[in-house]
Image (cartoon, rainbow, N blue to C red):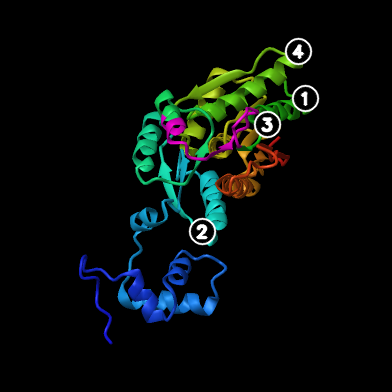
């Protein structure tokens, strides 16, 4: 018998997919959501049937039928940043095999965009939300509180009742960089930052506090709210040399800026680290191939995604994670630039 599309909508139905594959609708649904417990041969039959019928899943209908969405919202500040791409991939690796759909919202480091995304995506009734950091508008925070949706916060830590978060201390990382540069005999230190989101400022604060604790005046600061880029790193490095030519140690808020500064130093014949030591942040791919190789703080971005997704799964199952504020730490990778 030839399969016919749904009379009401003209679209193939899950029942037709299941019938063509010779399985129950429950098995077909689980196979289409890539749930790992479905027998691989059955899953192949279901996917072949769905392809033959040009079947498209209907998340809204599934939500109505189950009274629970299978969508999880992930809000990140930038898709152009390799840091968040690795985190997203790790999140999907955990959630998709368990049948969850990952909705991604990119708010470009703008609180108003994040607020709008939260408002819009809550209409999809996500069963959980993964958020980047704690700094957002009052309205966004109120929307999240009123929604009552389980949330896990990434990249930062907060010891507070009811808060589940996975990350590391940005302040401690900044302090570690300062201690390293001071141990190298550097005394005229600078901090170069862009974007100026909450985590950049936390790193700056930790850096400055460690310098002051060592009995030195605070580091000079060259900062701009402009989006971070390699090109901007070169421009800010030139400004630093022009305004403060005696600087002998620099902490760049991320590797993009440090890469740009390294290229500019090569062009200008500035000896790194003999004249100025450089340290970046995140230890992105390429840091170990720079000339000279860049010292950077390695952050556990993929591991943060994995543990944040697992913590959210615990919340969805009615369990609070053993460690609500999970500190995954960081590593200062010392190379030739410092």
Q: Helix, strand or loop at disc 4? A: loop
| CA separation in Å, label 2 and label 4 | 51 Å
Spatial separation of the CA atoms under disc 1 and disc 3:
19 Å
Rounded to the nearest angstrom, the CA distance separating label 4 from label 3 is: 19 Å
Q: Badge 2 is on which residue?
A: 96
Disc on the earlier residue, 4 or 3? 3
Q: What residue is pinned by disc 4?
A: 215
User: Marks 2 and 1, how far apart in space?
Assistant: 49 Å
Reading the image, the residue beneath label 3 is 173
First to last magenta residue range: 143-164
- State which tag comes first along the sequence, 2 or 1: 2
| Point 21% across, 65% down: residue | 9
Q: Residue 311: horizontal and vertical position, in percent?
A: 61, 45
Question: Which mark lies nearer to you, 4 or 3?
Answer: 3
Residue 199 coordinates in the image, percent (x, y): 56, 30
Residue 227: percent from left, percent from top? 44, 33
Q: Between residues 162 and 264, which one lies in front from this camera angle?
A: 162
Disc 1 crowd rating (10 Å Cα; few below 14, some 14-19, many 20+) is few
Q: Is residue 145 magenta?
A: yes
The first of marks 1 and 3 along the sequence is 3
Q: Residues within 10 Å of mark 3 (few under 14, many from 20)?
A: many
Q: Quadrant of the N terminus?
A: bottom left
Mark 3 and mark 2: Cα distance apart in space: 32 Å
Dot 4 or dot 1, earlier in sequence: 1
Q: Decide which of 39, 229 is in the foreground and name it.
A: 39
Residue furthest toward the bottom? 1
> Gap between marks 4 and 1, in whole Å?
14 Å
Q: Image check: 184 left or right of 77?
A: right
Secondary element at image label 3: helix
**Of the residues under marks 3 and 2, which one precedes in the sequence?**
2
């Amino acid at each position: 018998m030839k399969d016919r599309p749904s009379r009401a909508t003209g679209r193939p139905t899950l029942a037709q997919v299941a019938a063509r594959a010779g399985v129950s609708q429950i098995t077909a649904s689980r196979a289409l959501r890539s749930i790992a417990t479905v027998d691989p041969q059955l899953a192949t039959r279901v996917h072949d049937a769905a392809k033959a019928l040009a079947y498209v899943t209907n998340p809204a209908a599934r939500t109505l039928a189950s009274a629970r969405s299978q969508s999880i919202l992930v809000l990140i500040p930038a898709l152009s940043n390799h840091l968040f791409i690795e985190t997203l991939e790790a999140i999907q690796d955990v959630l998709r095999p368990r049948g969850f759909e990952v909705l991604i919202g990119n708010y470009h480091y703008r609180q108003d965009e994040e607020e709008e995304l939260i408002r819009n995506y809550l209409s999809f009734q996500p069963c959980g939300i993964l958020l980047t950091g704690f700094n957002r508008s009052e309205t966004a925070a109120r929307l999240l509180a009123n929604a009552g949706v389980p949330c896990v916060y990434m990249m930062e830590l907060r010891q507070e009742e009811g808060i589940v978060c996975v990350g590391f201390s940005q302040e401690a990382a900044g302090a570690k960089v300062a201690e390293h540069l001071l141990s190298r005999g550097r005394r005229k230190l600078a901090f170069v930052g862009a974007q100026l989101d909450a985590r950049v400022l936390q790193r700056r604060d930790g850096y400055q506090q460690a310098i002051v604790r060592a009995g030195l005046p605070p580091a000079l600061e060259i900062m701009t709210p402009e989006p971070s880029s390699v090109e901007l790193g070169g421009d800010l490095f030139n400004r630093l040399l022009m305004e403060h030519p005696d600087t002998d140690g620099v902490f760049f808020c991320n590797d993009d800026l440090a890469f740009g500064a390294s290229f500019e130093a090569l062009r200008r014949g500035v000896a790194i680290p003999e004249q100025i030591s450089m340290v970046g942040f995140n230890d992105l791919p390429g840091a170990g191939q720079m000339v000279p190789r860049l010292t950077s703080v390695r952050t556990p971005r993929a591991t943060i995604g994995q543990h944040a997704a697992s913590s959210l799964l615990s919340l969805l199952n009615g369990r609070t994670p053993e460690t609500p504020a999970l500190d995954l730490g960081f590593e200062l990778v010392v190379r030739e630039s410092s």
